[in-house]
Image (cartoon, helix red, strand yellow):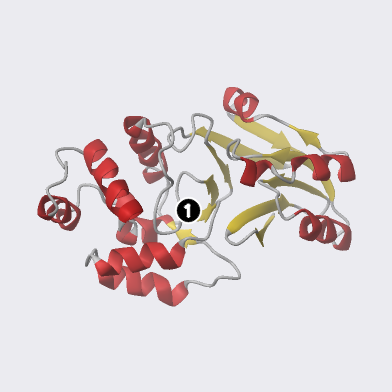
Amino acid sequence: MYIKQFKYHSDNLAYLIHDASYAVVIDGGAVNDILSYLDKNHLSLKYVFNTHSHGDHTSGNNRLIQSTGAKFQTVNSLIAEKKVLVENMIIKIYDTPGHTRDSICFHVNDWLITGDTLFNGTAGNCFTNDYAAFVNSLNKILALPDNTKIYAGHDYVVPSMRFAKKHGLNVSAVDEFLETYAPAHVYSYLSQEKAHNIFLRLSSPDIINLLQSKGMAHENNIQRFHSLKEIEIWD
């Protein structure tokens, strides 16, 4: 089985998961590149999926469906099913609300397509204002094996690593990750995210010290997530 990443707009990332004959697309905004790849590799697109319903992730749905005859399945139906079998591909669905109420992650082999829940180096904005749900969603991801490859919905590596270094947050882990970062194929291992991603290190002393120094709420992980987002957004 293979995973192909496509970049579109300035930083969005789309994904095609396929075997030798069949494929599914997730957040397929890079329509022309995806159609070209399908044609070149003689692949039949079976399904169009999304990690959540924001327009920058759903923009390619109609063209892909019309061009290929692929079926569309809504996020809510995927949440209800919890697992999808596409030919010989087993795709697990994790309900991960926080960024939006309908945010989900797709787990295939050791790949986790996280949409705007978890980025490589940061986490999505909490548009639901349900920070408890967002932290719970991140805990679901933290429970996965360390060798899980994180494939996110955007490439925000450079600004997120700049933020961590500016505030002295595990700089050695940041530098190690940046040595492996390749804009042409953006991913990280969960073990790396545990070391450098501030939103997966909410109980770490350096995170707590930063929030204390700024007089921000830090009594529990929910408060720390909220406070870190406030700093990150306005930094």
Neighbour class for label 1 at 10 Å: few (<14), some, many (≥20)?
many
Q: How many marks?
A: 1
Q: Residue furthest front?
A: 234
Using the image, determine if residue 178 lies above or below residue 69: below
- In screen coordinates, is 197 left or right of 19? left
Q: Residue at x 45, y 58 (%)?
A: 120
The x and y percentages for residue 227 are 24, 45
| Quadrant assignment, res 63 | top right
The x and y percentages for residue 13 are 61, 56
Using the image, determine if residue 108 lies above or below residue 232: above
**Front in this rendered view, residue 212 or 113:** 212
Q: Which quadrant would the N terminus be assigned to in this image?
A: bottom right
Under mark 1, the amino acid is Thr
Q: Residue at x 39, y 70 (%)?
A: 177
Q: Residue at x 31, y 68 (%)?
A: 173
The x and y percentages for residue 208 are 15, 51
| Quadrant assignment, res 197 | bottom left
**Front in this rendered view, residue 36 or 109:** 36
Return the residue at label 1.
Answer: 148
